[in-house]
Image (tube, rainbow, N blue to C red):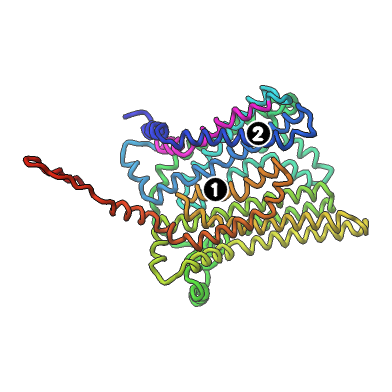
Amino acid sequence: MTFLPIVDRELRVRARQKSTHRIRLIGAVLASGLVASMLLASAFGRGVGRFGGFVFVALAWLAFLYALFEGARNTADCLSEEKRAGTLGLLFLTDLKGHDVVLGKLIATSLNSFYSLLAIFPPLALPLLLGGVTAGEFWRLVLVLLNTLFFSVTAGLVISAASRDEFKARGGALAIILVIAAGPLLPAALSVALPASIAPQVTSALDGSVLSLASPVTGLRSLFDAAYQAAPRHYWNSLLIIHSLSWLFLISASCLLPRAWQDRPVMPSNPWSQRLVSGENTLAPEVRRRVQDRQMTPNPVLWLAARHGGPQPYLWAGIAILASAAIAAWLISRGAPPVLFGIFCGAWGVHLLFTVLVASQACLFFAQARDSGALELLLCTPVTVNQIVEGHINGLKQRFLAPALTLVGVELLIVIGQMLLVSTRDKLSLDAYVLLPMAAGALIYMFLTDLGAAGWFGLWMGLRSRNSGQALARTLLLVLIAPIISVACCSSVGLLIILFKNMVFITYAMDQLRRNFRAQVTQRFAADQAAALQPVRLTAIGPGERPPVMKD
């Protein structure tokens, strides 16, 4: 048998696909266009060397974020999808081993991401011509990006090998990537939480520990000349630890997959664990029946969208931990401006993660229903298109609205406390009465409108995309990533885009769902019908000729 047969097949297939070449071209064009726009927008008022360093740092962080989250987008559902389809067991009926399947899926899902990263490297080298960037920084960045991409896709593989549900697989991959990437934040968090007498000793001990070095962010921060010359071991140790961890993930997925692909029998569930997983299933039968009747009476689709219960307890637990940490840090520091700024930055990061969670669930609704044929069955019933869309939107509200409002309430509580604290020191403070409420209001406005845009636009992308991963990538790129890049390139135009882009996305998605829902669902049947109705060309048969043989 051929060595690594699935890898051999996937490489041959990818080499013949036009999308492989197009993705490399698109990645190079986008990176070059981003560099050109930054040159045109920010060249004035900066020295040549200083501007080259600014462009290099901005491009390095953007490329790093791309490499970090590719695993949650590409490989987190590659094996669990095969489990749900029931095709993974067919592979193990052959002579294939676990590592054959895992490496084949790794190549199939990550080859285009690797090609896109390779296409970004030439634009990343353009700041070398501007000055302020050394060749050593560039090559160290190349190693960090390749290592980060390898870590991300292997983390997605090991989670996918152990999961069956798509939402849990993507959420688990994203969680493990973020937890490992947040290692350098631990010393800073402890410096705020611990007493001032022991905080410096603890943070200095953790600064070079495994928890801090086992993070891709540490390698990115330590590749620049100033940090690298001060402590080169931080860079190389971080690179080695992350690379070893990636191989551990890959070996674990290869060993776990042959033992985790079978369907497990349904065991009687424990009431306590059931209460932790779903609140609806632990209710009394009469109460549960009343809840279902209340959901199905106005809109039966709402029950379909919310049949898995309310928001997951892990979401509430995460919100409780983050809210308690933010309030404790604010109380301990007594409203110190650096701590308040850190709380605002942390709140913005939590808002982004929450928006990603809503977008992933919204993209998953219609993608799963289309694959299972449930959407075609719904269109055969008296349920209207508006009821289908409104039911899924209300399902998102039932799952995520209460946690989102809880986050907003905690943030408003901290803002009001800060206003009262500052006003006691200075009754005419501009920060307390103007700047702080404006910043908090803008942050909350962007959070709530981002949730609406992610929900509506995610539903539309889930309906018209090939799978939920592609829908999620499009939604996050258009709703979150593109506006942030526009602010980095051109601040004045970017701020206008951020203020009004969510309303545009919501209006566009609502209109498309109302007009083209039925056409998108029945698109594959219309294509089959058009192929069947193509006219058949008849040819005359001469004397002595045999009629053509009809093939199936």
Residue at horizontal 37 percent and vertical 33 percent from the top: 9
The residue labelled by disc 2 is: 35
Element under disc 1: helix
* Mark 2 surroundings: few (<14), some (14-19) or many (≥20) residues within 10 A: many
Q: Amino acid at mark 1?
A: Arg
Q: Is residue 492 left or right of residue 9?
A: right
Task: Check residue 173 in the rendering and tell me which mark sits there, or answer none.
Answer: none
Mark 2 vs 1, N-terminal side = 2
Q: Amino acid at mark 2?
A: Val
Task: Tell me residue 391's x, y (percent).
Answer: 51, 67
Magenta stretch holds residue 125: yes
Q: Is residue 358 left or right of residue 341?
A: left
**Magenta residues, dominant SS class:** helix
Q: Look at the picture and state if 52 lies above or below 437.
A: above
Magenta stretch holds residue 498: no
Residue at horizontal 85 percent and vertical 53 percent from the top: 334
The foreground one among 169 and 14 is 14
Q: Quadrant of the N terminus?
A: top left
* Mark 1 surroundings: few (<14), some (14-19) or many (≥20) residues within 10 A: some
Element under disc 2: helix
Q: Which residues are magenta?
A: 98-127
The foreground one among 173 and 63 is 63
Q: CA distance from mark 2 to mark 1?
A: 22 Å
Residue 240 picture quarter? top right
Residue at horizontal 57 percent and vertical 42 percent from the top: 69
Task: Tell me residue 90's x, y (percent).
Answer: 33, 44
Q: Look at the picture and state if 32 lies above or below 182.
A: above
The residue labelled by disc 1 is: 474
Task: Tell me residue 507's x, y (percent).
Answer: 59, 60
Query: Does residue 65 appear in the picture of this structure?
Result: yes
Task: Tell me residue 453's x, y (percent).
Answer: 60, 57
